[in-house]
Amino acid sequence: MNASKIREEIIFGFKVFSDHLSKIPIRQSNTSVINTISPNSYGLSTRNLALDQALKSTDYLVLDGVYFSLAAILLRYKNIQKNQGPDVFYHFIERLNRMSGKAFFLGSTINTLDLIKKQAEFRYPNISVYTYSPPFTDVFSEQQELDIVNAINSIRPDIVFVGMTCPKQEIWSIRNRKRVDAGLIICIGNVFDWFAGTQKAIHPFWFSLRLGWFIRIILRPEIFKRNIGNQLKFFWDLLLVFIRLKKEPIYRPF
């Protein structure tokens, strides 16, 4: 696949994928990573250098949380293709099913992973499903990371779906992509719980209205309270850039 044919927009300091997910090949010569950018991850990246570097080193940084696209609309008069977490997950798992591929789910609890495995095997019978529940710690030890990598490499999956919290999953995916023998590493966070049924999923209708964030606040107000500072940082910075009291962040790839 010729990467020059993929549409991307450099906006607010990040290179954002703005094309259809079908343009992303599952297998290339090296393992590729899909991460997401949102007001929350932007705000967090301004205080977390490792996350900032991970997002800017990501092969395909897709739009999750449509309001990050306000930066492109207000500053470039362009819209960014919306590829939110559920969009990404269902697109690629359906492609895996058509190719009878192998999926590896990394993250969450053993119970949630068992439910994911049952759901996937029922809904996508052509996929071979593997899971791994890592230790619940903010930072993995080198041995813990090696155990995870060895578990993945023993399977050589087509896709590794990662369901850990931001920024842990983004940083892990970039730090380990050269050690992992897989086609894609895709960080999808809360989609694990939605697919497993351990949390109420947001109906696609609300995403189509760009109100998925609002329904999530109703269902999980604790997440909104935890992330509100990061989100306000994005909107405040965008306002200052828009009224020309601040320069737009510069994209500096790592």
Image (cartoon, rainbow, N blue to C red):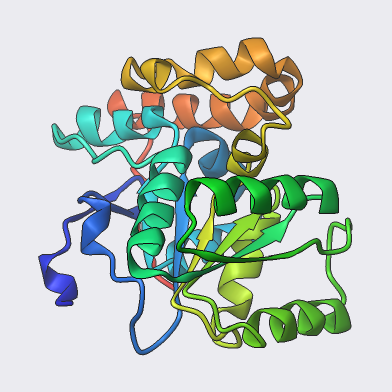
Q: Residue furthest top?
A: 218
Look at 61% across and 45% down and name the residue there: 119
Total residue callouts: 0
- Dividing the picture into quadrants, the one containing residue 252 is bottom left
- Dividing the picture into quadrants, the one containing residue 103 is bottom right
- Whether residue 244 is visible to the viewer of this picture, yes or no, is no
Look at 34% across and 43% down and name the residue there: 248
**Vertical position of residue 221 compared to residue 166: above or below:** above
- Residue toward you, 58 or 118: 118
**Vertical position of residue 79 compared to residue 180: above or below:** above
Look at 76% across and 45% down and name the residue there: 112
**Which quadrant: the N terminus?**
bottom left
Going by the image, does 11 lie left or right of 128? left
Residue 128 image position (x, y, % from top left): 55, 68
**Which quadrant: the C terminus?**
bottom left
**Vertical position of residue 95 compared to residue 228: above or below:** below
Residue 232 image position (x, y, % from top left): 56, 24
Residue 171 image position (x, y, % from top left): 63, 64
- Residue toward you, 240 or 85: 85
Going by the image, does 43 lie left or right of 65? right
- Whether residue 110 is visible to the viewer of this picture, yes or no, is yes
**Vertical position of residue 56 compared to residue 195: above or below:** below
- Residue toward you, 167 or 163: 163
